[in-house]
Amino acid sequence: MAETKTAGKAEPKAAKTVAKTTPAKPATPAKPVAPAKAAAPKKVNKDEMMQKHQQMVQFVQNLLGSMENDMKRIRLTLNQLAKFDPENPESVEHKDAEQSMGNQELKSYSEENAEVVEGKFDGYFMVGNDQKKYPVPLNYSSKTKLVPWDFLKLKILEDGKMIYKLIQPVERKHLRAVLSKTDDNKFIAITDDGKNYFLNQAAVTFFKGKSWDELYILINDKEEMSFAAIEAIIKK
């Protein structure tokens, strides 16, 4: 019997699997970080700037005033030294400005087209040698920083105009205080030890003072009167 050959179908060859390699994407460059914006400069209030300017001007004026007062005392001492008499050693005995002026007699006299009166400042008026009280303008008192018993000269012109001049300041004491108000709405200074001093209201207005502002004041060295001149106000 013939042998029958069965031809088997050839098995299909397995397809070669080729792995497709996806090319790597190039790295995305980092976005540059924008620099932080600088803070906008703080706007300065014009009124505050002017107030600080006025305070600086007043501070310099105070320094000049103190220097002028010191110069007056120096001149007074030089005049005393110029009177030295070797035969009388007491002729050069030191006397402070207040004693020397206190020993001087207040005068009143006439000049060309004017009457002149000398007197002492009591905090509000100049008390003349005739015991009359002459009103001292608040602006002048504030600017000159008058304290009680400063010696003044008043010139009264023919047209009635009154011109004051500080002849000799008394010795002063510097104090720190706080600004406060009385029941009748007047500003006063209260020192660290609780003493109260009346103030020139025009000076408080000039410095734009408010209650509880810190201030520096000038008083008579003998503390004979409860009135003070304002040297400076430090805003809160």
Image (spheres, rainbow, N blue to C red):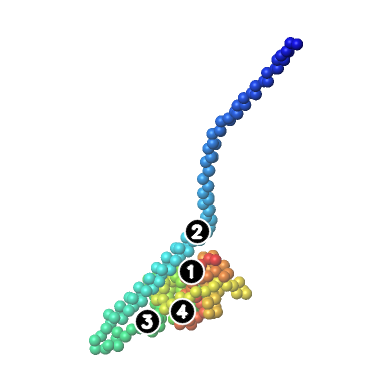
Q: Nearest to the eye among marks 4 and 1: give it.
A: 1
Distance from Cα at disc 1 to Cα at disc 3: 26 Å
Residue 18 or residue 201, whichever sits in front: 18
Where, by quadrant of the figure, is residue 27 drawn? top right
Which kind of residue does numbered mark 2 sit on? Met
Q: Residue at x 71, y 14 (%)?
A: 5
**Would residue 20 appear left or right of 141 to someone viewing this image?**
right
Sooner in the amino-acid sequence: mark 2 or mark 3: 2
Q: Give the number of the disc on residue 50.
A: 2
Closer mark to the observer between disc 2 and disc 4 = 2
Question: 108 or 69: which is nearer to us?
Answer: 69
- Image quadrant containing the N terminus: top right
Comparing labels 2 and 3, the label whose residue is closer to the camera? 2
Dot 1 alpha-carbon crowd within 10 angstroms: few under 14, some 14 to 19, many 20 or more: many
Q: Which residue is mark 4?
A: 220
Q: Nearer the viewer, residue 228 or 165?
A: 228
Q: CA distance from mark 2 to mark 4?
A: 31 Å
Question: Which label's residue is closer to the chain start, 3 or 4?
Answer: 3
Q: Amino acid at mark 3?
A: Asp
Q: Left or right: 133 with respect to 82? A: right
Mark 1 sits on what residue?
232
Image side of residue 75 versus residue 152, left or right: left
* Residue type at tag 4: Asn
The answer for how far apart the CA atoms under marks 3 and 4 are is: 14 Å
> Which of the marked residues, 1 or 3, is nearer the chain's N terminus?
3
> Which amino acid type is shown beneath numbered disc 1?
Ala
Instruction: Give whichever of discs 4 and 1 has the lower sequence position.
Output: 4
Specify the farthest residue to the front. 1
